[in-house]
């Protein structure tokens, strides 16, 4: 199992939800976060904060966490890139981690049966 942590522009949330629904993922967790990438939050929309001096500008992003079967990972990455990339800086990132185990609390299901 792998967890994809997908950081996207807020306006791309519906698109990513649809992609995850299409592959019948067992669930997802969404958070509203602030972040920046290599441009430190500049040249990604708001370039100027008047009267406020800062070297790091945090922008609103959405964080999607989803745990999926290994075999879905490449397909999901391709779909997300295809539908979420705008070609402009700030499109976001996908972080991928190994998940050792999972438990469905109601039933006690473990591993892939639990996702
Ligand atoms: N190394 C990182 N660690 C944690 N979060 C990150 C990292 N890089 C990016 N993020 C998150 O992803 C969001 C979008 O990053 P962004 O797409 O701007 O990355 P980038 O490396 O600057 O790429 P680009 O040059 O295309 O803008 C950030 O606002 C932040 O929330
Ligand atoms: Mg960036």
Image: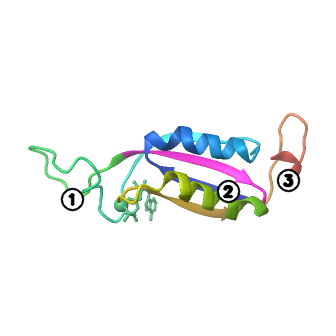
- Crowd tier of the residue under label 3, counting other residues whose Cα lies within 10 Å: few below 14, some 14–19, many 20 or above: some
Instruction: Measure the C-alpha gap from mark 2 to mark 3.
Output: 12 Å
- Residue nearer the viewer, 49 or 86: 86
Q: Which residue: 13% across, 46% down? A: 52
The image shows residue 49, relative to residue 39, as above or below, that is: above
Q: Are marks 2 and 1 in contact (CB under 8 Å)?
A: no
Residue 22 lies, in percent from the top left, at 71, 44
What residue lies at 47% left-to-right and 56% top-to-bottom?
85
> Residues under labels 2 and 1: Cα distance?
32 Å
Identify the disc placed on residue 39.
none
Q: Of the residues tagged 1 and 3, which is closer to the observer?
A: 3
- The reply to whether the magenta stretch includes residue 88 is no
Which portion, as a residue range, is magenta?
A: 60-69
Quarter of the figure with residue 96: bottom right
Q: Which residue is mark 1?
A: 55
Q: Nearer the viewer, mark 2 or mark 1?
A: 2
Task: Label 2, secondary structure: give it.
Answer: strand
Above or below — where is 39 with respect to 63? below
Q: Which mark is residue 3?
A: 2
């Amino acid at each position: 199992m792998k967890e994809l942590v997908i950081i996207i522009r807020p306006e791309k949330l519906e698109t990513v939800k649809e992609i995850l629904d299409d592959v019948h993922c067992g669930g997802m967790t969404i958070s509203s976060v602030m972040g920046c990438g290599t441009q430190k939050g500049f040249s990604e929309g708001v370039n100027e904060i008047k009267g406020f001096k800062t070297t790091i500008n945090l922008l609103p992003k959405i964080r999607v966490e989803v745990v999926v079967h290994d075999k879905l990972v490449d397909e999901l990455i391709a779909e997300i890139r295809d539908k979420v990339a705008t070609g402009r800086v700030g499109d976001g990132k996908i972080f991928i981690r190994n998940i050792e185990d999972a438990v469905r609390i109601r039933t006690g299901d473990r591993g892939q049966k639990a996702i």
